[in-house]
């Protein structure tokens, strides 16, 4: 189990039994996106945010989330068209350090990509979160992922404006917000050229009915806007692929 002889993985099978397997084999054969957490997210007294569930628009299922920072990163990945599966804490990695001691780490997040590769990630609330143990574990997990053609990342927190915009759009991610039949083509036509949000909504119909469909389309990338500045009624919204002024980062 030392680094020279590879890593091992521990996960729960579909009936909840713990399985321990060579990591290289597990990465090739196990559908981690379908597994429950291998261990529960900790509840830390005094913190405003605790463990919960995130409904994924990508999979139509719930994903376990342990913190507000993790929910924010789930929001980002759930919008990524290359992501096909998501899971919270589905695997524990084991290895031995240079002194022969057994070490383990449970990455907070797993994402499956369209090409079959995976991402293991942690979602620190600030760059120093977890201390030296997290830094050492990150090095080991990154090495394990490189062996299998996967990736490991400590996902940097979003700035407050981008996080707030994504949180707002996430409220409209469910298919019910696409609206009645025929509304989506009207919305797409209204924003065939970039224009202020409220003007396009009024051009497509009653804004009370239209705005949820616009936000739904922004969430799914069918429309786009600059999400690194506050989203408001005069924010410019355009067709998918439009590159507006200052449009960077998590733009829709």
Image: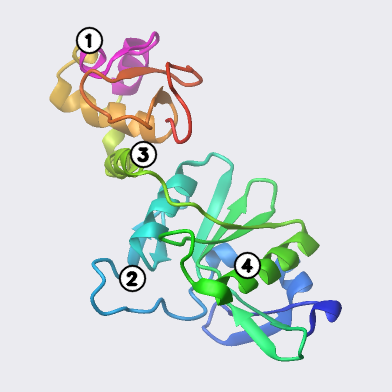
Q: Main secondary structure of the magenta part?
A: helix
Quarter holding the C terminus is top left
Q: Nearer the viewer, mark 1 or mark 3?
A: 3
Which residue does the image show at 68% across and 67% down from the upper left? 139
Q: Is residue 235 above or below residue 50?
A: above
Q: Are marks 4 and 1 in contact (CB under 8 Å)?
A: no
Which residue bears the numbered disc 2?
51
Find residue 233 and report its horizontal and vertical position in percent. 20, 22
CA separation, marks 1 and 2? 42 Å
Q: Earlier in the sequence, mark 4 or mark 1?
A: 4
Q: Which residues are magenta?
A: 182-201
Which residue bears the numbered disc 4?
138
Q: Is residue 133 above or below residue 84?
A: below
Q: How is the image coloured?
A: rainbow
CA separation, marks 4 and 1? 50 Å
Q: Earlier in the sequence, mark 2 or mark 3?
A: 2
Q: Nearer the viewer, mark 1 or mark 2?
A: 2
């Amino acid at each position: 189990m030392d680094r020279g002889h590879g890593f091992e993985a521990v996960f729960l099978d579909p009936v909840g039994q713990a399985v321990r397997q060579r990591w290289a084999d597990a990465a090739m054969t196990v559908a981690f996106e379908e597994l429950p957490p291998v261990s529960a997210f900790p509840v830390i007294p005094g913190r405003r945010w605790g463990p919960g569930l995130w409904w994924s628009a990508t999979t139509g299922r719930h994903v376990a989330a342990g913190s507000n920072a993790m929910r924010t990163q789930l929001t980002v990945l759930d919008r990524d068209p290359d992501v096909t599966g998501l899971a919270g804490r589905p695997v524990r990695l084991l290895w031995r350090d240079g002194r022969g001691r057994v070490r383990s780490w449970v990455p907070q997040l797993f994402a499956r990509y369209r090409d079959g590769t995976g991402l293991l990630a942690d979602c620190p609330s600030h760059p120093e979160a977890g201390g030296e143990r997290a830094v050492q574990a990150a090095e080991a997990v990154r090495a394990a992922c490189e062996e299998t053609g996967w990736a490991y990342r400590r996902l940097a927190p979003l700035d407050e404006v981008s996080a707030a915009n994504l949180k707002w759009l996430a409220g409209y991610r469910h298919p019910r917000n696409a609206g009645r039949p025929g509304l989506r083509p009207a919305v797409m036509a209204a924003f065939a050229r970039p224009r202020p949000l409220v003007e396009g909504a009024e051009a497509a119909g009653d804004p009370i009915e239209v705005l949820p469909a616009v936000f739904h389309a922004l969430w799914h990338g069918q429309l786009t806007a600059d999400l690194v500045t506050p989203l408001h009624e005069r924010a410019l919204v355009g067709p998918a692929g439009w590159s507006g002024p200052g449009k960077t980062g998590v733009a829709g």
